[in-house]
Amino acid sequence: MINLVDLQRQFQAIKEEVFKEIEKVYDSGQYILGPKVLELETKIAEKLGVSDAIAVGNGTDALVMVLDALGIGAGDEVITSPFTFFASAEAISRVGATPVFADVDPETFNLDPGKTAKAITEKTKAIIPVHIFGQPADMDEMNALAKKHGLYVIEDACQAFGAYYKGKRAGSLADVACFSFFPTKNLGTIGDGGIITTSNPELAATLRKLRMHGTSKKYYHDAIGYNSRLDEIHAAILLVVLEKIDKWNSKRQEFAEQYRTELSSLSGLTCPKASADRSHIYHLFCLQSDKRDDCLQVLKDNQIASGVYYPQCLHLQEVYRSLGYRKGDFPEAENLSNTLFAVPMHPFLYKEEQEKIVQTLKTVLGGDQS
C-alpha cells in the first residue's frame, strides 16, 4: 500500500536522533514543562518572528484556551470556515460562544473575506481563518476587517507550520495563532501536542497561567484554567523535527509541482492552486473531480491510499443543526466536500510511487488532453 502519509518512514529516518534525545529526557527526571519545552518555545518563537510561544497539550486545546484568554464566551459569535476539521468550530462552542460560518474561496479553499464581511454582526468578537491544507488565508483582508469592526483574528495554523504569507511566517500574521503537533501534521510528534504563538506578552502570560490550572504560582489560583501541557519527551522529538521541517516542506512542494506537471492536463481533474504571494506547504495535496468516486476506487484497487477532506461541511453536522443552517447555504464549501480528494503527500514519498499514482489516475481520467 502506498500510504497517504507514511509516519513509519518519517520517524525511522530520525529514529537515532530522537532516541538520543528521549534518553536525555528520561535521565533528567524532568518530564513536564521542563527545559526541552522552553527550548522548543524559544526556537519556534524565533523561527516565526513572534515574541512568545506557549506549548500546550494539543491543537484543539490551543484554540479553546485562546478564545478563553480573549474573554470570548456565551452571547458572542466567532466566524470561521465551514470547510475545515471540526475542532475549529468545536473550540468556539466549547467556550460557550456561537460559531458563525462563511463560505470559502473555490480556488484556495480558505475563508472568503467578502463572505466573512457579510457574516459580521454586533455579536461578532473574532474571526478564525484556517490555513487549510497548508496555504495561508487572505490575512491582510482579514486583519483589515478586524480593525474596522474591533475584532480579534486567530490563525488556525494547525496545518501550516512553515508556510509564508507576503514574507512573514504563518503564526505571526494575526493577534494570535494555534498549531497542532498531531503526528500527521508537517511538524508532528508521536502523540498529541500543540503550541500558541503571539506577540502580545500580556496574552501570553494569561495563556501560560491557563495551561497550568489558572496558576502562575504553585498552589495559588486566580483563574479557572486547564491541564494542558506539552510533555518533555514530545518537545524533545519536536526539536529534532524542527531542524528538518523546512527541508521536508520543500520536498512536499517538489512533489506538488510534479503532480501538477503530470495531472494538470487531465480532463475533469483540477489541481490545487498556490497563490503567488504566499507559500503552500501541502499538509495535504487535494485534487478536485466530478469523478471522485471512480478515482477513489481505482486508487484503492491499485493499493494506493486516498482520503476525502472533508466529507461533510461543519454547518451540516448533526451537532450544529440548532444553528439553522441548511444545505445550499455555502455552495463553494459544499461543492468541495463532494469533489475533493487527497492523494499521497509526504516528504518520504518515492518517485516511483508518485509515478504509479499519476498513471493510475490517468486510467480513470484519460491521458494528456493537450
Image: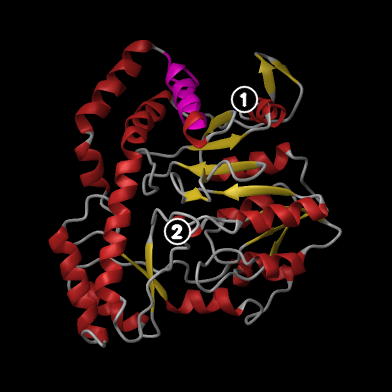
Please identify the residue farthest to the right as the structure is shown. 122
Marks 1, 2: nearer the viewer: 2
* Residue beneath disc 1: 212
Residue drawn 35% across and 40% down? Answer: 245
Per the rendered image, the range of residues in magenta is: 30-45
Q: Coloring scheme of the render?
A: secondary structure
Q: Earlier in the sequence, mark 1 or mark 2?
A: 2
Q: Is residue 176 left or right of residue 11?
A: right
Which numbered marker is on residue 72? Answer: none
> Which quarter of the image is occupied by the C terminus?
bottom left
Circle 1 packing at 10 Å, graded few (<14), some (14-19), many (20+), is: many
Mark 1: which amino acid? Met
- Above or below 315: residue 34: above
Which numbered marker is on residue 133? Answer: 2
Residue drawn 31% across and 54% down? Answer: 252
The picture places residue 137, in percent across and down from the top left corner, at 56, 58
Q: Quadrant of residue 332?
A: bottom right
**Mark-to-mark CA distance, 1 and 2:** 31 Å
Q: Nearer the viewer, residue 78 or 224?
A: 78
The picture places residue 83, in percent across and down from the top left corner, at 55, 66
38 falls in the magenta region? yes
The picture places residue 24, in percent across and down from the top left corner, at 31, 16
The picture places residue 351, in percent across and down from the top left corner, at 16, 59
- Above or below 191: residue 132: below
Q: Nearer the viewer, residue 56 or 124?
A: 124
> Which quarter of the image is occupied by the N terminus?
bottom left
Mark 2: which amino acid? Phe
304 falls in the magenta region? no
Name the secondary structure under disc 1. Answer: loop
Residue drawn 78% across and 63% down? Answer: 120
- Above or below 206: residue 125: below
